[in-house]
Image (cartoon, coloured by chain):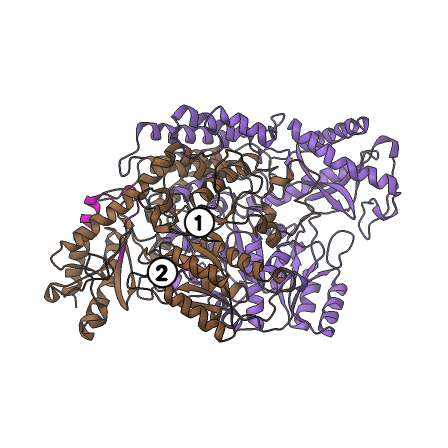
Chain colours: A brown, B purple
């Protein structure tokens, strides 16, 4: 760019060309038989981009012309994962809401940071409004006055792991108020999370100087929910061994099976033991939007903190994470540094500055897209997104049950994730067993013959890879009860029964191909 | 949204309306006499939005119609800080590059996460390309082969504070490899950073369980650069007192005066003492793009890690941060959790997955906008942005020197930040003293009469607030050597000499008004 000059002709053409292309993409996203991914290996991608601007930046990175740059933009789109495609069921995000996307664009164009009121007056108040409403849903805020509090019940942060990290620091700080100044005092701190909980607990413990040995994994039931009695037992054992329990993480929507811990039962234990209860609602917190599904988080109102990723079920673009806290006053006590070049006490409305109540300084504006989408969808639209997701998962469970043994559930499941195995014809029907109180019988992996287990274990990676290469669908797999199983996350608002049926047919066909190739 | 249906008419109209408005904003941003901010208090903002959709979300958040939503979008733009405006000289970011903005939009529309190759094939390779090139600029990578390494020399993270946090954990991990599993071992760890260094050091120490008492602030010279002898002395004192030094943070571009520590001298000390050298290049790292200014970071190639915010000087939208590391193999050793639902070893090209080499899991795609901008601007365009910034600061320093005592420098400065005081007519001329080897004489605050000092201290908040309310400019102030002084950050590529002159005139006029009102 010629500094200071208005946009040159080429720059203007590139800007307008990208806007046109990305707008077209947004209003007419891939669907149906469009590929979910145009698969290419790293070397194939490098070769493809070599025909336009090249992926690498050489010793002297050149200026590329409009035609080559726009051709490269086309390649970026072509070779990227189409997460808006209904048949992207691979991950705990999918189907960004177009309102969120354009809200994100608006925030990017205004490009400011959320740290201070003076450079983010509108967004600071939006954060107050949204945090107040989310805090109300979680039961932390008893009534919505319509006032926008200078110190809202939580903060926006850069992702779920970050939210859990900050929550655990708050928990440690409540027990050891001088930890932030004097550091760890020699107590052997331990926290508790279920075996199915997110690895953010481990990574946070490592970063906090507690160490991963200070993370006690509590037993889960067959579905992936924490066994409350096992929690109480584990706390007792830790105390007896001379450790200092300080926090419990209850998971609302596990990563693999979307199971919900019994937060009420866990809250009872935390209260009796005097422990901080942090709820990992990164995935399942959004169930609180739906009157039909909010019961899954019963007891969340008794927790001390709750992290919630709106970029997962709610279709906000990456990222949109809130950490809700019951006691907002603690945020400044735990995190403030009082930098005098930024949080001046002698400027206008500094009491609204959010930057000194958290760890991050500059923050992207993540609230605008959420606020804008909420104003367009309303509470009812948000609830509908959740209800549709569970309805699609129920449809998938029905198709699995009616598959004549081609597919078998490995957990029953009642929320969005359907966890199942593909069974080759020569092993059908595999005997299923009832799972607890749930109606859907499941495959009991523990009683499988070793050879059969090894054979079943081998299919998902092969089937997934063949779908990935063909672009016909994108679905995840991972070991559950020791067996590689598919995990279909039914969450995208564009996912329809016909897509589910097509995905299952594709898996079945790819399974037959894998069988033939053995 | 009616789940699963294509966009309703209203939704489509809102999407298209926002795209049109934000595109217009991007291609014709505010400038000249346009307001930098349309100032409104929190209550005034709440009243304004009450005429459209309201800021708050009530007990039952309603669905708003197209007209009201688009009117609210207009209000969002009107009442937000115009960070693209040349007269926004308030902060260490300004003037987003329009190519970066549309690159950001493209990433938002494709909405995926950077954690795994399978869902981010193009972006994973772009990260390799960009990190390799940035690592080359920092001297960590000796030659650019054009290959895209599966394990690049660093990572993208969510901001400068996060980068410093991760760097300090790497430093601690090198000294205590079992800290990630066993936690802090009782050693009283200390790290060193200059008095002018960023507060991320304090916040990171608190979070890491080291405690802010473990942060030793090293004396700086008048300009804000660390005094290397003072560092060596402080390390010796800490050792003598039984502490365990483990890291030094050298600052390349301080927040207030944009001073550069002598990294070569600090590297000598770190080598002789066996300490990790982390460079905080969040602000000034971008000087490495310019052949004329790269010398300011001489010695960076001897450091172990370097954090660099491309969203500051380079005009990337919030955020775009890299943490460069000299030894990339340590990243997995320090941060990996090996979650088997995400980092499967039996999937295609899992060796490229970046997610287990860092703390964060899902990450927004921050590389695309940087890569795209670099392909459009080239190395020369990036250098020009830096050179223009310093040229505008030099112009400002010239105007301050030629102001007949209306403005006086409080530090000399040679980079982008101009730090000065406004002097009322009855106190002109204030005697200045030579600053070290630098040519520009400065105000020696320490010899000021207490009354004069108090009077001068009072002007910046009043002048800034009056400019903010008028929308005529946005400039920061903070205490330097104990005196409130202005900090004009000359960084926006749209900033021209005429803007500088207008800003100084505005300050002078507002100063006279403040004087009259005393």
Residue segment shown in magenta: A487-502
Q: Which residue carries the number 1 mark?
A: A301
Q: Residues within 10 Å of mark 2 (few under 14, many from 20)?
A: many
Tag count: 2
Give how far across and how far down residue B483 sits, in percent.
Answer: 79, 44
Horizontal side of residue B100 vs B236, given as left or right:
left
Q: Residue shown at 23%/43% (left/top)?
A: A496
Closest to the camera, between mark 1 and mark 2, is 1
Q: Is residue A450 magenta?
A: no
Horizontal side of residue A346 vs B160, given as left or right:
right
Q: Secondary structure at mark 2?
A: loop
* Label 2: chain letter: B
In this orientation, which residue lies closer to the viewer: A259 or A63? A259
Horizontal side of residue B13 vs B132, given as left or right:
left
Residue A65 at least partly seen: no
Q: Residue shown at 61%/39% (left/top)?
A: B492
Distance, label 1 to label 2, CA atoms, is 31 Å
Horizontal side of residue A298 vs B173, given as left or right:
left
Same chain for labels 1 and 2? Say yes or no: no
Give how far across and how far down residue B77 sits, in percent.
Answer: 52, 30
* Label 1: chain letter: A
Which disc number belongs to residue B342? Answer: 2
Q: Secondary structure at mark 1?
A: helix
Q: Is residue A491 magenta?
A: yes
Q: Which quadrant of the figure has residue A310?
A: top left
């Amino acid at each position: 760019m010629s500094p200071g000059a208005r946009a040159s002709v080429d720059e203007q053409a590139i800007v307008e060309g990208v806007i046109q292309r990305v707008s077209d993409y947004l209003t007419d996203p891939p669907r149906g038989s469009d590929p979910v991914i145009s698969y290419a290996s790293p070397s194939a991608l490098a070769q493809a981009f070599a025909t336009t601007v090249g992926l690498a930046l050489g010793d002297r990175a050149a200026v590329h012309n409009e035609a080559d740059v726009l051709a490269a933009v086309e390649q970026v789109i072509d070779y990227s994962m189409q997460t808006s495609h209904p048949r992207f069921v691979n991950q705990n995000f999918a189907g960004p809401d177009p309102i969120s996307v354009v809200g994100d664009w608006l925030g990017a164009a205004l490009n400011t940071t959320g740290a201070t009121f003076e450079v983010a007056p509108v967004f600071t108040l939006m954060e107050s409004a949204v945090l107040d409403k989310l805090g109300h849903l979680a039961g932390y805020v008893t009534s919505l006055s319509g006032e926008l509090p200078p110190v809202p019940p939580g903060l926006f942060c850069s992702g779920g792991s970050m939210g859990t990290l900050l929550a655990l620091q708050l928990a440690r700080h409540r027990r050891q108020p001088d930890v932030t100044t004097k550091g760890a005092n020699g107590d052997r701190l331990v926290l508790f999370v279920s075996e199915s909980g997110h690895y953010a607990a481990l990574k946070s413990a490592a970063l906090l100087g507690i160490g991963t040995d200070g993370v006690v994994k509590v037993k889960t039931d067959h579905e992936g929910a924490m066994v409350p009695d096992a929690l109480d037992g584990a706390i007792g054992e830790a105390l007896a061994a001379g450790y200092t329990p300080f926090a419990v993480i209850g998971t609302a929507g596990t990563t693999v099976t979307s199971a919900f811990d019994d937060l009420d039962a866990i809250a009872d234990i935390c209260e009796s033991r005097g422990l901080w209860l942090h709820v990992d609602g990164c995935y399942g917190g959004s169930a609180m939007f739906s009157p039909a599904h909010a019961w899954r988080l019963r007891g969340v109102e008794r927790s001390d903190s709750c992290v919630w990723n709106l970029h997962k079920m709610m279709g906000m673009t990456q990222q949109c994470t809130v950490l809700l806290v019951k006691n907002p006053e603690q945020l400044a006590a735990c995190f403030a540094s009082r930098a005098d070049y930024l949080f001046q006490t002698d400027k206008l409305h500094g009491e609204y500055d959010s930057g000194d109540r958290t760890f991050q300084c500059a923050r992207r504006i993540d609230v605008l897209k959420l606020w804008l989408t909420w104003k367009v969808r309303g509470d009812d639209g948000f609830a509908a997104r959740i209800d549709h997701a569970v309805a699609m998962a129920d449809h998938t469970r029905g198709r699995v049950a009616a598959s004549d043994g081609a597919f078998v559930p490995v957990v029953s499941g009642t929320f969005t994730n359907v966890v199942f195995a593909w069974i080759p014809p020569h092993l059908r029907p595999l005997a299923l067993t009832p799972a607890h109180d749930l109606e859907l019988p499941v495959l009991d992996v523990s009683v499988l013959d070793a050879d059969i287990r090894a054979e079943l274990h081998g299919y998902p990676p092969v089937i997934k890879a063949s779908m990935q290469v063909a672009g016909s669908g994108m679905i995840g797999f991972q070991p559950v009860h020791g067996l590689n199983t598919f995990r279909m996350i039914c969450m995208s608002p564009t996912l329809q029964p016909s897509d589910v049926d097509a995905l299952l047919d594709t898996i079945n066909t790819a399974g037959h191909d894998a069988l033939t190739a053995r």
